[in-house]
Amino acid sequence: MADLSINLAGIKSPNPFWVASGPPSNTAYQAHRAFEAGWGGVVWKTIGDAVVNVSSRYSALNVGTVRMAGFNNIELTSDRSPETNFREIVEVKRRWPDRVIVASLIVDTRERWHEFVRRSEDAGADGVELNFGCPHGMCERGMGSAVGQQPAVTEKIVSWVMEVARIPVIVKLTPNITDITQAARAARRGGANAVSMINTINSITQVNLDRLVPEPEVGGLSTHGGYCGPAVKPIALNMVQSCAADPEVGLPISGIGGIANWRDAAEFIALGATGIQVCTAIMHHGFRIVEDMADGLSDYLDAKGFKSVMDLVGKAVPNVRKWEALDLNYKRVARIDYDKCIGCNLCYIACEDGAHQSIDLVPPNGRGLGPGRVPGKPIPQIREEDCVGCNLCANVCPAEGCITMASIDRGLQKMSWKDYQEKLARGEVKPIPAHP
């Protein structure tokens, strides 16, 4: 059985699953519940000067029958006093000495950073996470993403923290920036031990068309909030990989953003995260989701022959390259399993109107009928000579496994765009003709 324990910049955890800083990590009661369910760590809801929150605070993007595909919040950091938060960290750490407690912090001056780091250490925290990502409320006070969007400021504040820190320091980065690697590099220059990403993305999820006010509404007004949940996972994966692949970053990564199951966790780890943090999925489904996450990840590691989580970290990073490195001569085509076809013909519509017009509707001619098909109704047929392998039909098909993509050997040598440009300059190839 694979070893699920991790070591993130010196922070040892029994598994890679941590509760992210947010509403689920607001109190000792919640931390106890999380650890009872099996979470390896809790990143405490951000501690600083107690704030005043508004009502209401959340809104969601629902897609079809999927609730909270995207989630928006305008909630601020902890509205409880630092004294209460640090006292409860002491309580939780005493009860759960083998689990991880990371104190998330947000203050303003050098002296205050020194004070809060020392208080975190005195409370028994295993590490601190500097909140340089909050995109609303706190940034208007010169903190949160107002820091994370300026690499020079990030570097300076991290250097302040490192003057006194005796436990690992994680810098939580904002995605609301042109190039997150610049912020990660700044964190390293300041002396940080690790980075976590991503914090929430500036967003407005919906507008009440009767009142003409976006949600969440606060007395007839609203504001942009922090976007999270499954919808942000692709953005988070991209940023995690970018930092993992950058030699000037070179820091362990705690991955955050839309993680809800073991597959999500494994993808983040394969793209460079040592561990992961979860918030929105807990708010949606509760702490018990960690049981399936741990079981699923363990089974996956065993099936792939990995001895530990650490063996998976970064394994997919080298397989992400610039577009210019991709093989122009590689060919894939779509194939249809008619025993699974349900006759919706969405593949035909998508290809005809939105792609490359390489699917025809033809008589069944005795081919097998999948569940729900209407006898005699035309069926889709791929013209492989015209198929460009774009994957659109497979993506829109609602029948699992009905449309798959097959690789075709055309007997051509690999040639990337970069290779092509170099050969073109040497006169070894002719210009590729444009499509008529």
Image (cartoon, grey):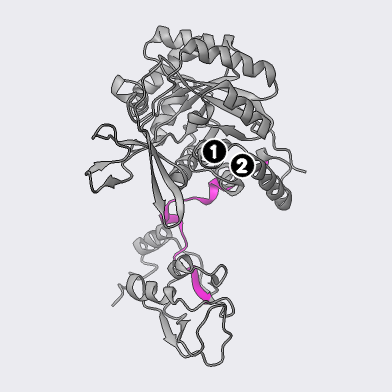
* Disc 2 residue type (three-letter): Ile
* Disc 1 residue type (three-letter): Ile
> x and y percent of residue 46 in the render?
46, 22
Secondary structure under the numbered disc 1 in the rendered image = helix
Quadrant in the picture for the C terminus: bottom left
Q: Is residue 421 left or right of residue 7?
A: left
Quadrant in the picture for the N terminus: top right
Q: Which residues are magenta?
A: 311-335
Q: Is residue 68 magenta?
A: no
Q: Is residue 329 magenta?
A: yes
> x and y percent of residue 42 in the render?
58, 27
At x 50%, y 70%, the residue is 332
> x and y percent of residue 318 in the render?
54, 47
**Which residue is farthest bottom?**
365
Secondary structure under the numbered disc 2 in the rendered image = helix
Image-quadrant location for residue 239: top left
Q: Which mark is residue 289?
A: 2
Q: Earlier along the polypeptide chain: callout 2 or callout 1?
A: 1
- Residue 231 appears in the rendering: no
Whether 368 is drawn above or below 332: the answer is below
The residue carrying pointer 1 sits among few (fewer than 14), some (14 to 19) or many (20 or more) residues within 10 Å by Cα, namely some
At x 49%, y 70%, the residue is 331
Whether 103 is drawn above or below 354: the answer is above
For label 1, the residue is 282
